[in-house]
Image (cartoon, rainbow, N blue to C red):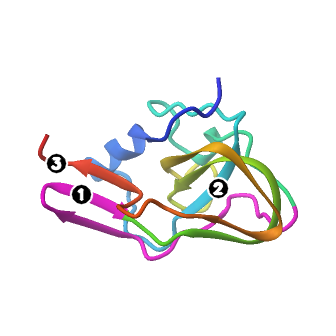
Amino acid sequence: MAVTAAGYYFLTFEKQMIDTAGQSIEAETHKEALVADGYTPAFDTHDFRNDLTNEVSGAGYTAGGVAVTSTELTVSAGTAVWDFTDTVYPTVTITDAMAGVVYFNVGADTTDQLIVLQDFVTAASATAANFTIQHHATGVVRFDLTP
């Protein structure tokens, strides 16, 4: 099995909801790593960055990815939205990135809690160029609070 859908990592979500994550969803310390199609996400059991496999590599790409910035959680009209600016990996040469995984950057792969996987649907590459993840205009994660 491989990356086939986007999703929220539940164990981290549960910790956030019961206030044991010890991290703010609006912190400016989160990072986004890129994984290839060989990574099989397990949204109900993967909780830390050491659960990630098949992280991409290449010239200019730093393991663990890059920081996400301008994180913001808003609630309006019964919908909670978590968003941040588009993620840019400057001047990289990478092949077959299939998803970006955002995580709390606590400092070690055994403590960095996974937040969300963004499935690109089609593998993407860059050759000595900026690789940009353009996030959806309506937010990275949306929760309908009034189903």
SS under mark 3: loop
The answer to whether the residue labelled 3 contacts the one labelled 1, judged by CB atoms less than 8 Å apart, is yes
Q: Quadrant of residue 139?
A: bottom left
Per the rendering, the mark at residue 145 is: 3
Q: Position of residue 66 (x, y in %)?
A: 64, 67
Residue that badge 2 annotates: 33
Q: Earlier in the sequence, mark 3 or mark 1?
A: 1
Q: Decide which of 129, 56 is in the foreground and name it.
A: 129
The three-letter code of the residue at mark 2 reads Ala
Q: Is 129 one of the magenta-colored residues?
A: no
Locate residue 8 relative to residue 67 in the image: left or right: left
Disc 2 to disc 1: CB gap under 8 Å: no
Of residues 138 and 67, the one nearer the viewer is 138
Q: Quadrant of the C terminus?
A: top left
Q: Which mark is residue 80?
A: 1
The local secondary structure at tag 1 comes to: strand
Q: Residues within 10 Å of mark 1 (few under 14, many from 20)?
A: some
Left or right: 126 with respect to 99?
Answer: right
SS type, badge 2 = strand
Is residue 98 depicted above or below 28 in this figure?
above
Name the spot of residue 79 as percent of width and height, x first: 20, 55
Q: Which-is-in-front pick, marks 2 and 1?
A: 1
Quarter of the image for residue 119 reads top right
Q: Is residue 84 above or below residue 16?
A: below
